[in-house]
Amino acid sequence: MKSTPRTSTPRTSASRTTASRTTAAALAVSTAAALALTACGGDSGGDSGNEITVAFAGAVNAPKEDVATYAVAKDQGFLDKEKLKVKTINADGSSAAIQAVTSRSADITAADVGSILAAKEKGVPIKAIGGLVQNWPWRIAVKPDSPIKSGTDLKGKKIGVISLASGSAPYARAFAKDAGLDGQKDVDLLPVGIGTPAASALNTGKVDALALYTAPYAAIENSGTKLRYLPNSAAFQGIRSLTFAAREDTIKKKKDALTRYLRSAYQGILFSSVQPKGAMQIGFKTFPAMLSGQSAEQRLDGDTKVLQSFLDSATPAQGEPETFTNWGAISDAEWNKTMAYTRSAGQITENIQISDAWDPSLLAAANQFDGAQVISKAKAYGPK
């Protein structure tokens, strides 16, 4: 993974080589067994042809994962093919998303792994069931003329984070610690949100640096603010971020429904990676609030760059869409590294057994779709 954010423009075959993908051993679960669950989510047989409903909690008013995993999946018939109806619930951040799942307001969410592990340590009956963001998306950014050239220069500086409860806070402290600083004492974290407030905080000197992920940075750069990124060290490679998760009892009772959801979501991401501008147009149609009073034409190019930054993090760093396989897989090595990072960042105090936090039993069936057909559909769609 590169140490600076990837370009917002779609990648070409010259910029990729064939992906080398790690498959979790637990993916050996048979497709037949996964699909034999009932449509209403029971543990034994039944009619899986009936329409079922799944409630998803996420940031539905931003050009990110919900455009690809829900809007595109709905518009392009992936949900209909699964006989699946999805209800979206807007959740501001991973903590709120996990709370929605915990309270059963939602069946599934996409939350930061660190937040999932922290909830698990507190006794929340939640498990990750499929990867989403594959490549570490968090970066430290400064203004181009900033005297801050490396992590060591952050000593005594103010770093803007989304909130103290978001994944950006532990990342900022972990980045400082990786640079040899005391992540608790040597940097001062200040909540600045994302978008215009974050850009303003940096431009006015309220903070010396920002700790955000790639999509908000793309939006800030769209607004005219130029940024320079400090490189992440190899210590951050292989750490997982946004991941699908559900309550343990929901996984048992609605396993078939969640499998259908994952299968349609991964098709939506694949479609969007081939046709990001078309996907963004679909997003505007599905979530008109994203336009904020502007026309789709006014926002299309800028929001497509934001969506592309998410897609770059949610698809393999190498390879073409035709080579993408094993959607959602997270290896034991990635889990161990993520666990170590989460503990180092102070989100958990003890390591958690991987099997207690991770249930990959849905993924074999979730990967049972024709990727070539999805790619052909995306190429034929074209921006309107």
Image: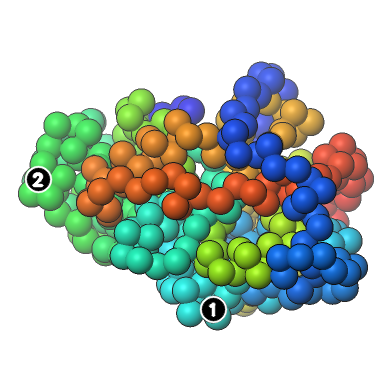
x, y percent for residue 25? 59, 33
Q: Quadrant of residue 136?
A: top left
Q: Quadrant of residue 191?
A: bottom left
Amino acid type, mark 1: Arg
Q: How many marks?
A: 2
Amino acid type, mark 2: Asp
x, y percent for residue 114? 37, 52
Real-space Cα separation, disc 2 to disc 1, in angstroms: 40 Å
Residue identifier under label 2: 186
> What crowding class fits label 1: few (fewer than 14 Cα within 10 Å), some (14-19), or many (20 or more)?
some
Q: Secondary structure at mark 2?
A: loop
In this view of the protein, which residue sits in the foreground, 126 or 164? 126
Residue 11 versus residue 301 in the image, above or below:
above
> What crowding class fits label 2: few (fewer than 14 Cα within 10 Å), some (14-19), or many (20 or more)?
some
**Residue 322 seen anywhere in this rendered image of the structure:** yes
In this view of the protein, which residue sits in the foreground, 131 or 218? 131
Residue visible at 82% across and 48% down in the picture: 32
x, y percent for residue 18? 69, 20
x, y percent for residue 249? 56, 69
**Residue 296 seen anywhere in this rendered image of the structure:** no
Residue visible at 39% across and 46% down in the picture: 353
In the picture provided, is 217 more to the left or to the right than 210? right
- Which quarter of the rendered picture does the C terminus lie within? bottom right
Q: Which of label 2 and label 1 is nearer to you?
A: 1
Res 104 label: 1
In the picture provided, is 244 more to the left or to the right than 260? left
In this view of the protein, which residue sits in the foreground, 131 or 383? 131
* Snapshot colouring: rainbow
Residue visible at 11% across and 41% down in the picture: 182
In the picture provided, is 225 more to the left or to the right than 210? right
